[in-house]
C-alpha cells in the first residue's frame, strides 16, 4: 500500500493555505458574518451540492474495468451523499430565505465554473481526478464546518435547524476522510495520482473563488 495520501497533502499545502486565508471563510469561521452572507453561502452550497451525486455517477461510468475498487468506493459515496442538497434548502427555510427561490435560480458564475470544471475533467480527462474535489470539500468541512456553525449560530441567534448542513458535514466528514485516506493509499498509478493532485489544487482555487464571490456584509 502506498503513502499517497501524505504526498497529496504535501503537494496541495500551498493552495490549501491560501484558501484558508480567504476573508469570507475566516469571518465565517469566527461567526463574523451577516444573515444575508450566511444565506448567500447556503445558496451557493445548494448550487454545487446538488451536483454531487450526478458527478459521482458520471465518475463511476467513466472508470475503466480495472478500477472496480474505486467504483465500489464511489457507490459508497453516492449512498452517503443522496439528498444532502435538501438539507441545505431546509436550512435556508429555517433562516428566513425562500428555498424555492434557490431551487430555481442560477448559480453564481464562480460556482458554475467550479462544477463545470469537474464535469469536464471526468468526461475529457482522467475521471480519477474527481477525488481531488473530495479532498477539498470534505477536508474543508472537517476544519471549519462545526466550529463555524456554532459561531454563526451564536452571532445571529438562529435556531439549530438552520445549521444541519454545516453541523452534519463537520462530524460526518471526519469518518469520510478516514475512508478517503485509506482509499487514496490504494492508488499507485502515477497518472491517477497526478490527476488527483491537480484537481485538488484547482479546486482550492475554484472553490476559493466561490467564497470570494460571497458578500462580506449583506
Image (tube, helix red, strand yellow):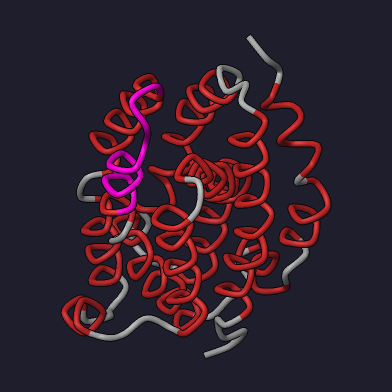
Query: Magenta span has 1?
Result: no
Point out residue 107 in the picture as x, y percentages from the top left corner. Answer: 37, 81
State the residue lying farthest toward the left.
100
**16 vs 113, nearest the viewer:** 113
State the residue lying farthest toward the top.
1
59 with respect to 87 (left or right): right
Q: How many marks?
A: 0
The residue depicted at 73 percent of the width and 58 percent of the height is 20
**In this picture, is 12 found above or below 6?**
below
Q: Which residues are magenta?
A: 55-66
Point out residue 205 in the picture as x, y percentages from the top left corner. Answer: 67, 66
**In this picture, is 62 found above or below 160?**
above
**Main structural element of the magenta stretch: helix, strand or loop?**
helix
**In this picture, is 74 found above or below 28?**
above
**In this picture, is 170 found above or below 65?**
below
Q: Quadrant of residue 32?
A: bottom right
Query: Magenta span has 60?
Result: yes
The residue depicted at 26 percent of the width and 68 percent of the height is 94
Amino acid at each position: 500500500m502506498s503513502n499517497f495520501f501524505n504526498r497529496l497533502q504535501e503537494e496541495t499545502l500551498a493552495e490549501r493555505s491560501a484558501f484558508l486565508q480567504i476573508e469570507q471563510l475566516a469571518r465565517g469561521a469566527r461567526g463574523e458574518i451577516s444573515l444575508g452572507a450566511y444565506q448567500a453561502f447556503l445558496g451557493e452550497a445548494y448550487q454545487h451540492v446538488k451536483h454531487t451525486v450526478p458527478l459521482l455517477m458520471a465518475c463511476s461510468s467513466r472508470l475503466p474495468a480495472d478500477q472496480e475498487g474505486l467504483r465500489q468506493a464511489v457507490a459508497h459515496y453516492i449512498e452517503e451523499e443522496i439528498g444532502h442538497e435538501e438539507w441545505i434548502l431546509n436550512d435556508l427555510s429555517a433562516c428566513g430565505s425562500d428555498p424555492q427561490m434557490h431551487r430555481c435560480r442560477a448559480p453564481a458564475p464562480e460556482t458554475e465554473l467550479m462544477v463545470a470544471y469537474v464535469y469536464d475533467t471526468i468526461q475529457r480527462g482522467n475521471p480519477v481526478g474527481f477525488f481531488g474535489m473530495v479532498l477539498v470539500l470534505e477536508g474543508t468541512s472537517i476544519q471549519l464546518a462545526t466550529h463555524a456553525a456554532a459561531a454563526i449560530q451564536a452571532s445571529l441567534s438562529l435556531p439549530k435547524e438552520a445549521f444541519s448542513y454545516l453541523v452534519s458535514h463537520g462530524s460526518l466528514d471526519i469518518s469520510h476522510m478516514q475512508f478517503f485516506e485509506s482509499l487514496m493509499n490504494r492508488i499507485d498509478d502515477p497518472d491517477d495520482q497526478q490527476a488527483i493532485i491537480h484537481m485538488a489544487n484547482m479546486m482550492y482555487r475554484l472553490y476559493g473563488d466561490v467564497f470570494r464571490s460571497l458578500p462580506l456584509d449583506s
